[in-house]
Amino acid sequence: MKITTKGRYGLTITLELARQIGTGPTSLRSIAEKKNLSEHYLEQLIGPLRNAGIVKSIRGAHGGYILNADPSEITAGDIIRTLEGPIVLVESMEDEEAAQRELWTIMRDAVRNVLDNTTLADLLANESKSELDDGYMFYI
């Protein structure tokens, strides 16, 4: 399984919207500038996220996008499936031995489990934890 820039940037967009909860809508331009990404490319990704009900657009001079649910209710799997399609590791397994098919199934299920049990809130919490860990200096 390979996550393309669609999935990676989709996570970037939604994580940034999760960081901005309570501050109003966030424009794609501001996300693109902050993350040094193509605004045009982000515009292509936001449509499927909106259609899937993950984000909501707000019109007007101070418009932009907001998450359509709490970050604890949106999983990485929701975003990846919306932008990448179904999660598969191997295209076709029919011509392989049963032991191989079982391995691919176990691996696929493990990846699905991680994606479906990791929310945007979890990712933000891990981000905060990483920032705290980076602040320590050890001397020997």
Image: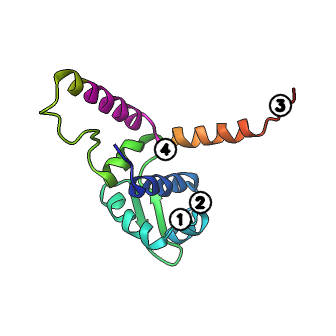
| 71 up-or-down from 16: above or below | above
Q: Secondary structure at mark 1?
A: loop
What quarter of the picture does the C terminus occupy? top right
| Residue drawn at x 31%, y 48% as measured from the top left | 81
Question: Which tag, 4 or 1, sits closer to the chain's start?
Answer: 1
Graded by Cα atoms within 10 Å as few (under 14), some (14 to 19) or many (20 or more), the crowding at tag 1 reads many
Question: Which tag, 1 or 3, sits closer to the chain's start?
Answer: 1
Mark 1 and mark 3 in contact? Answer it, CB < 8 Å: no
What quarter of the picture does the N terminus occupy? top left
The range drawn in magenta is: 103-120
Q: CA distance from mark 3 to mark 4?
A: 31 Å
Residue 105 among those drawn in magenta: yes
Amino acid type at mark 3: Phe
Frontmost of labels 2 and 1 is 1
| Residue drawn at x 27%, y 50% as measured from the top left | 85
Q: CA distance from mark 4 to mark 1?
A: 16 Å
In the shown orientation, is residue 24 left or right of residue 52? right
| Residue drawn at x 37%, y 42% as measured from the top left | 77
Q: Which residue is mark 3?
A: 138
Q: CA distance from mark 2 to mark 1?
A: 8 Å
Amino acid type at mark 2: Thr
| 113 up-or-down from 58: above or below | above
Q: Which residue is mark 2?
A: 23
Mark 2 and mark 1 in contact? Answer it, CB < 8 Å: yes
Q: CA distance from mark 3 to mark 2?
A: 37 Å
Q: CA distance from mark 4 to mark 2?
A: 17 Å
Q: Position of residue 119 (x, y in %)?
A: 46, 40
Q: Secondary structure at mark 2?
A: loop
Frontmost of labels 3 and 2 is 3
Question: Which tag, 4 or 2, sits closer to the chain's start?
Answer: 2
Label disc, if present, on residue 120 of the rendered structure: 4
